[in-house]
Amino acid sequence: MQKKLLIIIFALCTQVAISQTTIIRNPEIAQMISEISSDSLEHHVRALASFNSRHTLSTDEKDGMPAAQRYVLSKFNHFAKQSGGRMTAEIEKFTIPADNRRITADSPGANVIATLKGTNPNDSRIFILSAHMDSRNKDVMDAEGNSPGANDDGSGTAAVIELARIMASHEFSATIMFVAFTGEEQGLKGATYLADKAKSEEWNLIAVLNNDIVGNSSSSETLIKDNLKMRVFSETIPVAETEQEGNIRRYTNADNDSKSRQLARYVKEHGDKYVDQFEVKLIYRADRFLRGGDQTSFARNGFTAVRMSEMNENFIHQHENVRVEDGIQYGDLPEFMDFEYLRKVSAVNLASLASLANSPGQPQEVKIDVRGLSNKSKLLWEAPAIGNPAGYYVLMRETSSSMWEQKFWTTETSLTVPYSKDNYFFAVQSVSDSGAESLPVFPIPLSR
């Protein structure tokens, strides 16, 4: 009934602009979001922080990184029982080569991965939800000292575990990988290993949502307390941009329309739609100053990736040894986290990931006709290689705007709108009969 109703709505809206404020929530996604538990998230954070050290080079089988990895694996395997055989989990081991910096000798590394296989045998797409489970002290080479790493990045790892629990029993067209990386603090080692593997094996990896430091709502120094906002970082000019892509970007002035920027907008739209009392803020940077995250490894290999992060960081509880100094408690401890805030961030991830994994493939060969002078704009494209979309949205925004402002619905593979291509930016996305939208595709010029 829900699908038929949406199809009727789409048919009535053919070639009509749809307001960005229109809210139609998918009931299955809304139900999954309601199942996210702040208590469950807190349990996982406290369990991870209870290990003496999750340093990448920690070898303590009972109280170090190997034990923490087995904890995450045990959770993934437990959730897999609810998947009807579609979820499998493993600790994927690899060797981290010495880099004469933070890895002084070849060392063992491992990522903990749960893979939820897509239900469509013709859908080769992969979406990754990730975080890093390793922690550190002020001395990044201290592999034995107590480093609880509750927020950095027990928070992101807990979110990955919690979403794996909820999503395991649901069906998605595409495959979802839930990944807890090792080696982030030593130089993005686990993410680099997996990103290189994805590139060499030619995975159809569509998007990576990386969560790093997502469980605190109060800042040091400025003393801001605000659990109503989070940040999404996305690269502007792709680090892996080719010369041809650079020429097209400069010609179309698409500096603000990288694939990662499109993903960030998608996350904001779905977060704002599904998560009450919360706002996703777009940060037009690949990451913060002096810091980096695992999404970088995928961006370097040409994949679409963003970083999810809390809005206000508390540096007293990051990269600090646990101690009391001048009456101040230092260290990354669970008691300084906001688990209701972490629930909201987790909900933004779920809304975005579930929508993406059940969307049709992106439209192909998306072009905008620039062969003549006109105050109208014609866009044309080909159907996606994956899925059978009910139709398409042509998206439009003013050149000075950060978000798409209008949507035009069509069931055809071309559309002419009465707005000048000189004054607006456009994109096209596929839409399923249940309303799931693909990532938007920015058009290239059709000049002859």
Image (spheres, rainbow, N blue to C red):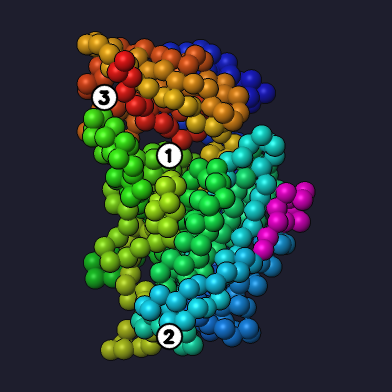
Give the residue pinned by disc 3.
424
Give the residue pinned by disc 1.
266
Tell whether label 2 touches label 1 (CB within 8 Å): no
Q: Is residue 87 magenta?
A: yes
Give the residue pinned by disc 2.
142
Secondary structure state at the residue bearing disc 3:
strand
377 left or right, relative to 110:
left
28 left or right, relative to 288:
right
Taking the spot 44% from the left edge, 25% from the top edge, the residue there is 365
Kindly identify the amino acid type of the residue bearing the numbered disc 2.
Asp
Q: Position of residue 62 (x, y in %)?
A: 63, 84
Instruction: Classify 10 Å Cα crowding around label 1: few (below 14), some (14-19), many (20 and above).
Output: many
Q: Position of residue 217 (x, y in %)?
A: 38, 62
Vertical placement of residue 410 versus 232, above or below: above
Kindly identify the amino acid type of the residue bearing the numbered disc 3.
Tyr
Q: Is residue 122 magenta?
A: no
Instruction: Classify 10 Å Cα crowding around label 2: few (below 14), some (14-19), many (20 and above).
Output: some
Q: Magenta segment range?
A: 80-90
Q: Alpha carbon of mark 1 to alpha carbon of mark 2: how far?
A: 39 Å
Taking the spot 39% from the left edge, 53% from the top edge, the residue there is 300
